[in-house]
Amino acid sequence: MKLGKIELGFTGPNMIPMIDIVFQLVMFFMIAITFENSKADERVKLPLDVLAIPREVKPEHELVLNFGFQRDKHGHKINSVPTVFYNDRDFEVGELTRVLDAEKRALEETQGRDVIEKVTVKIRTDSEVANGLVQQLIKKCQDSGFTKVTVVDRGRKGLE
Amino acid sequence: MKFANSTEPTKIVIPMAPMINVIFLLLIFSMLSMKIVSPEANFNINLPVSAPSHARPHASPHDIKVGLESDRDGNLTQLTLGGTNLGNDEAAFDRLNKELLLLIGRPGHPQTKDIEVEIDADYECQYQYVAKAVSLCTGKLDPQTQQGARYVEKIKFAPPHRPKS
């Protein structure tokens, strides 16, 4: 009786599904990191502006303050007094001095005394917040030693 | 004579798993490349400083003052340009843009670099109106070409007003 030829040899594991899974995981973490870095608060509804220029280079040190209203799940305002959302807590503008001072001390202890000059405070202001309160918030930041303050809008395209 | 039954159709199984994997990868790639969150942007505005030493003693003849008056709820009641009332509706902002263009003459001209616009808004005025006024002072976006023309480089805020009691 003649038997068919049996090929002997090492058959390696199928790598394709593993590579697929690794790609998926890499992309998942890329997305997760992108969302983490934005520090945006969905309660703050920024005013739309087509002429504001998106930043090309992200500042080395950035402190993001979200300034808006407490809203329900439908987006309606719960409280008429706007608050600053920072580190999962809400502060009124008047209370912010101690928060900014504590942040400044922490930054100076970890990064050196000169770091404050390099920190940019990015204020994300809700479109319905009173202008006077926005200016008050800017002044609080400047009084605490943060000289670089920027107020951002929802931009669409920069000027050519 | 007996022939082998070679004409019977054979079922070809197409492996679907690699195709689904590739589609998933393409989908995630396009999700990543798409900008889900619209970009946030800012203007080059001289924010009010607490130290008065930075303030200029006299206003330049080139300075233009844009005023925003509002009611207690923050709704815009009057938009002014150098004392001229432009109204309080959407058209008022368009008028501001056009009047400003008449004042500066040619956008991008070296002389326009010295012009500074001061935004003087009421305490209660909603920030969206201030942002819109700032935007329309800085320039205009052509709706067809989507190209922007810059009118004024320097914009500053006037010292804050007291709230209406």
Image (tube, rainbow, N blue to C red):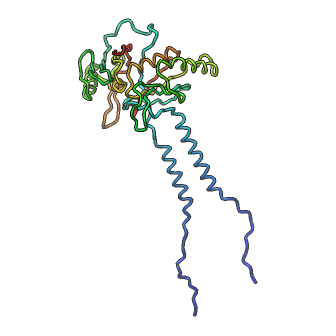
Q: Is residue A14 above or below residue B69?
A: below
Picture residue at 45% right of the left edge, 26% below the top: A67
Q: Indicate left or right for A138 with B124 as reference.
A: right
Q: Indicate left or right for B31 with A6 as reference.
A: left
Q: Nearer the viewer, residue A82 or A57?
A: A82
Picture residue at 24% right of the left edge, 22% below the top: B86
Looking at this rendering, what residue extends furthest in the front direction? A78
Q: Nearer the viewer, residue B113 or B40?
A: B40
Q: Is residue A28 above or below residue A64?
A: below
Quarter containing the C terminus of chain B: top left
- Residue A110, image x and y in percent? 64, 22
Q: Nearer the viewer, residue A147 or A53?
A: A147
**Viewer can see residue B1:** yes
**Viewer can see residue B115:** no
Q: How many marks?
A: 0
Q: In the picture, residue B114 is in which quadrant?
A: top left
Quarter containing the N terminus of chain B: bottom right
Looking at this rendering, what residue extends furthest in the top direction? B57
- Residue B25, image x and y in percent? 53, 51
Q: Is residue B152 above or below residue A32?
A: above
- Residue B160, image x and y in percent? 38, 14
Q: Indicate left or right for B84 with A151 as reference.
A: left
- Residue A73, image x and y in percent? 43, 38
